[in-house]
Amino acid sequence: MRDANPRTVYLKDYTVPDYLIQHVDLNFTLDEENTRVVSRLTMCRNPASRSSDTSLTLAGENLQLIRVVLNEDNELGDKDYLQTPDSLIIHDVPQQRSFVLTIENGIDPKANTALEGLYLSNGMLCTQCEAEGFRKITYFLDRPDVMADFTTTITADRDRFPVLLSNGNKVGHGNLPDNRHWVTWKDPFKKPCYLFALVAGQLECVEDYFTTVSGRDITLQIFVEKHDLDKCGHAMQSLKNAMAWDEQVYGREYDLDLYMIVAVSHFNMGAMENKGLNVFNTKFVLARPDTATDADYEHIEGVIGHEYFHNWTGNRITCRDWFQLSLKEGFTVFRDQEFTGDRTSKAVKRIEDVNMLRTRQFAEDAGPLAHPIRPDAYIEINNFYTLTVYEKGAEIVRMLHTLLGADGFRKGSDLYFERHDGQAVTCDDFVSAMEAANGADLSQFRRWYAQAGTPVINVAQHYDAAQKTLSLTLSQYCPPTPGQPAKEPLLIPITTGLINKDGSPALCRLQDGEAAEQVVLQLTQPEQTFVLADLNEEPIVSVLRGFSAPVKLAMNRPLDELAFLLSHDPDTFNRWDAGQQLAVQVISGLIVDYQDGSELAVNPLLIDAYKKVLAHPWEDLSYFSLLMTLPSELYLTEQMRVVDVEAIHYAREAVAKALAEQLREPLEALYLKHHRDESGQFDAGAIGRRRIKNTCLAYLARLDADWVQHWALQQFNSAKNMTDQLAALTVIVNHPHPASQQCLDSFYEQWRHEALVIDKWFTTQASSPLPGTFEKVLDLLDHPAFDIKNPNRVRSLIGAFSQSNPLHFHAASGQGYQFLADRILELNSLNPQVASRMVGALTSWRRYDEKRQGLMKAQLERIISTPAISKDVYEVAVKSLA
Ligand code: PHE
Ligand code: ZN
């Protein structure tokens, strides 16, 4: 646990490693409680190192050291090395030629509840090494710029561990006395140790193959527990889709002959891109129409793609150090977003991604933990797998794509792969490749990597009828963030279009440019004016199309102009966003009315705008559903200076109810039109029909009428797909319903053997706005199916309550805060990474009223003053109080 003063690591202190490892030969003798590891490292002094120290320091944690041997026969004694809680220092190693260091140590996977290193997940043994987990397996140079080739031999009991997996190709296997067997794996590609993986257990496998562009047949295997064999089809198809997409869009072919995926029930994150052997949270593999929702299907394809794409962006080319994390994550998220957009609906995918960015990442960027996508200091690197590094990182890559165009971007990525294959590099190397391939100067753009905070863009327009020009004056301002009081102006691409008053598009022509449907304005100055020519009348401007930059647009448009854009903007993102801004303005007015105790009367302009949306003949019903969805409570939270969770909830509910009452007929008709069960259908059409139908049901539920309750119950009882069943259950649990408990009980009985469905059961209850939810959450903690050692369960109950139920979590009494801090302290000693994630809900304390601020702060103070607090939890809590 924590030293008095946990050490901060700084980017500016980076130095090359003093030693290199060329070859790693690992030998595992597996046992749940006492696994033996023999690691034989072929090493040498790094010629690039400038240190004169002849000692060698290897990282290692929680290891029982058994012996150390230098060059095969020189067994080292106590005086030859020093063991510290997190390292092994060998006083003297050869400097002039390479040497072999053999280390034997023991580890206890069963005691490993942190799920980092080698651990037990539902009876199988598996590893998680990113970021610094390999040091919990054996002593090593655990840093990504040390790349080696690995050979791994695993020996284990044949019944307990019939399947033995590691990276690369299987090169040998055999039986041993005492019902034991062994397998040897060899990975021909050099890799950092964070990409090492080992899995052993009673696993079953689904197999398929993929033929690459160059005609190589790749064997694809998905390993799961036996009863999940019928839930692998979608993941397998997704993998094949991802392999084909990366060939087509990036010209990248898979390199090994085998690609394996293992699904594990106990996992801290979503999935892990270990070379040739991805380890996945079951949540992102298993799906059957009756157990997984349409959203789950989409997420599975996205995550399978994400991990597959890492093979080139992360594995073949990796990060020099962990400050460069966004090099692989930002780029790979951008790649998976585009993949999903191509596979589903580009418009819908973009809106979903921006929604998440604007609610969660903008909050992070505006709070005490704000950091650049390339941070410059950390205490615990696991705390930097953030929305900023991932999602904002992807937006930075997307801006390069926008600035350079698809062809220019592809030239840049080709050059990046060509220059750096087999290397551990920096974000700067990536930008340099983009620059060199395009003859571009991206020096100002590089500031996006170093500066935190969300820029605010102001737009002023002036039409000159005599000149027929429209002047757009854009300005940028980025508020201070911790450690960065003043910001430099950024290069911000702002895609802009024009619409005539009759709704037809107007062409955009910048001085001495060509006329086009839209232009990318490159804002580089604090304030800058762009002149658009040849405009016979003053057009309506559509700014930041496609959300071309991760910024806040401060444009206070009149409601009727927003309604106009909602009807006419040809840009699918801005059209949707106009509806969101319209709703935000109306709800914001009602928030004030609620606080004043006035009656909540909904502006008819909003009702009318939604009525028009309902009347339009949409083809993409998923997009239609998004247009019909009000901004979330969390997005509204972001718009308020002092957050008032009750006012937000009741004002938003008032609007939803008014829409349900006044648009009841079209909503009803739409529900009935699509309410037919289409289980097993996963094309965009069926997904869209389910989505719009369930959107209508959720509105109609606000009427609190018997007939709607009946519709919901009927849908719940007859649904054969999880999307419809869960949508009905959610409506039943979120609104007073006589059969609510009965439905929850029968759902539990139906799905008690499907852990991922039971997670949904917990989440649904923890997210309800109805009174009594807090007491329910307390009861659920004692439910036999609740297991604090399973991260998915923790997220489904504690995470959902604290992060997705603002009304109850922020109850004025402070009971929600105390509850969360209790759970964090309980988790702290079991799984610091998961505990640290849960602190997130308390870090935004400055956004609330004084009383809540005091209550939240008190819990944070209680957390940091706990003696055995982990550095994971400590870092987040202490920084949020600073
Ligand atoms: N590298 C993984 C991904 O983004 C995430 C991860 C990080 C998983 C750390 C486990 C531990 O795909
Ligand atoms: Zn990733």
Image (cartoon, rainbow, N blue to C red):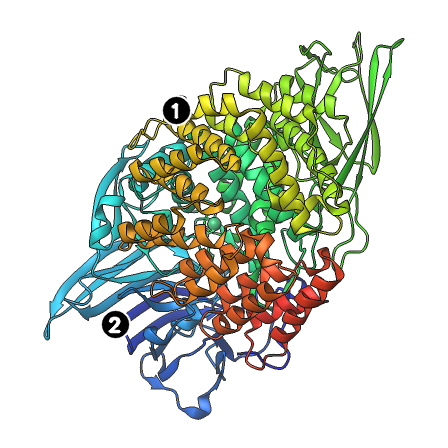
Give left or right: position of 586 versus 283.
right
In terms of secondary structure, where does tag 1 sit?
helix
Q: Residues within 10 Å of mark 2 (few under 14, many from 20)?
A: many
Q: Are marks 1 and 2 in contact (CB under 8 Å)?
A: no
- The tag on residue 30 is 2
Give the image location of residue 9, x and y in percent. Answer: 62, 68
- What residue is drawn where x is 69% and y is 62%? 852
The answer to whether residue 196 is above or below residue 600 is below
Disc 1 within 8 angstroms of ligand 1 (CB): no
Of 834 and 289, which appears nearest the observer? 289
The x, y position of residue 562, in whole percent, is 70, 24
Does the rendering let one see residue 276?
A: no
Q: Is residue 25 left or right of residue 58?
A: left
Q: Could you tell which of marks 1 and 2 lies nearer the N-terminus?
A: 2
Mark 1–mark 2 distance (CA, rounded to whole Å): 54 Å
Q: Is residue 853 left or right of residue 741?
A: right
Q: How many marks?
A: 2
- Residue under pointer 1: 674
Mark identifier at residue 245: none
What's the residue type where badge 2 is placed? Leu
The residue lying toward the viewer, choosing from 785 and 155, is 785
- Residue 380 is at least partly visible in this image: yes
Q: Secondary structure at mark 2?
A: loop
> Given this view, does label 1 or label 2 mark the residue nearer the observer?
1
Query: Which kind of residue does numbered mark 1 sit on?
Result: His
Name which residue lies at 64% across and 44% down: 650
Residue 325 lies, with reference to residue 238, above or below; the image says below
Tell me the quarter of the picture where residue 293 sits: top left
Q: Position of residue 256 (x, y in %)?
A: 31, 46
